[in-house]
Amino acid sequence: MTTRLKPLDRSSLPELEPLFQLVEGMMGFVPNSLMVMARNRPLLEAFLGLGAQALGPGKVSNELKSMVSHVTSRSAGCQYCMAHTGHTTVERAGVARAKFDEIWNYETSPHFTDAERAALRVAQLAALVPNGVEEADRAALAKHFTEEEIVEIVAVIGYFGFLNRWNDTMATPLEATPMAFGEAALATAGWHPGKHGR
């Protein structure tokens, strides 16, 4: 018997439908994490507001933000978020599959620029506990990005830090679309749905 909270049924939350439609337009589906969080509407609304700021249009490209979110989630070990961010990176942000397949080799792969390497290194190290970012990593980031861009990058890392803890703790069940992506694109690198499986 599982003790995890079940996602609420979307049809039981008609007052939240405009928010769900916005999310569905961005992701292609409404994540179960939000349907669990919907038990606390102020939290859900605040979370979505933060997401709109962290992930929305800004000075940093959507492609880089998506890659940062994936490396953050993979470093944190959240299988649910790895499937989500991998799917978003390739299918929604338009990062080439060949590049995505090399994302964990970002330090040496010719698919990545020095700027991307600096951002992904900070994402990988920031997701560790304790945080592994050191002065040299911050200096490399500052070499390639403005202060405003650095704030955007770290906001994405922080946003997914919340999601990684939330989904791993809640054992959020993975939806069909990211599950299929995980099985097709991540399993050869050791990904498995684990407690997020149906």
Image (cartoon, helix red, strand yellow):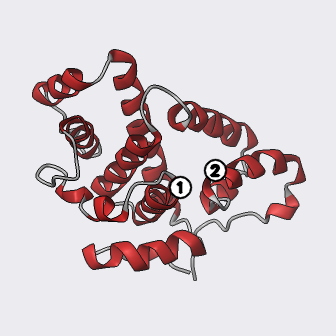
Residue positioned 27% across, 75% down in the render: 190
In what quadrant of the picture does the N terminus appear? bottom right
The answer to the question of whether label 2 and label 1 lie on touching residues, with beta carbons closer than 8 A, is: yes
Location of residue 28 (image quadrant): bottom right
Circle 1 is placed at which residue position? 92
**Where is residue 114 drawn, in percent x and y?**
18, 37
Viewer-side residue, 159 vs 60: 60
121, above or below 177, in the image: above
Q: Measure the C-alpha gap from mark 2 to mark 1.
A: 8 Å
Residue 64 visible (yes or no): yes
SS at mark 1 in the image: helix
Callout 1 amino acid = Arg
* Residue to which mark 2 is pinned: 26
From the top left corner, tell me how far across and down residue 7 is, in percent: 68, 65
Residue at position x 42%, y 31% in the image = 60
Above or below, 82 against 138 in this view is below
What amino acid is found at the position of numbered circle 2 in the picture?
A: Met
Residue at 37%, 73% (x, y): give it: 185
For the residue pair 59 and 19, the one nearer the viewer reads as: 59
Name the image quarter holding the C terminus. bottom right
- Residue 179, placed above or below residue 148: below
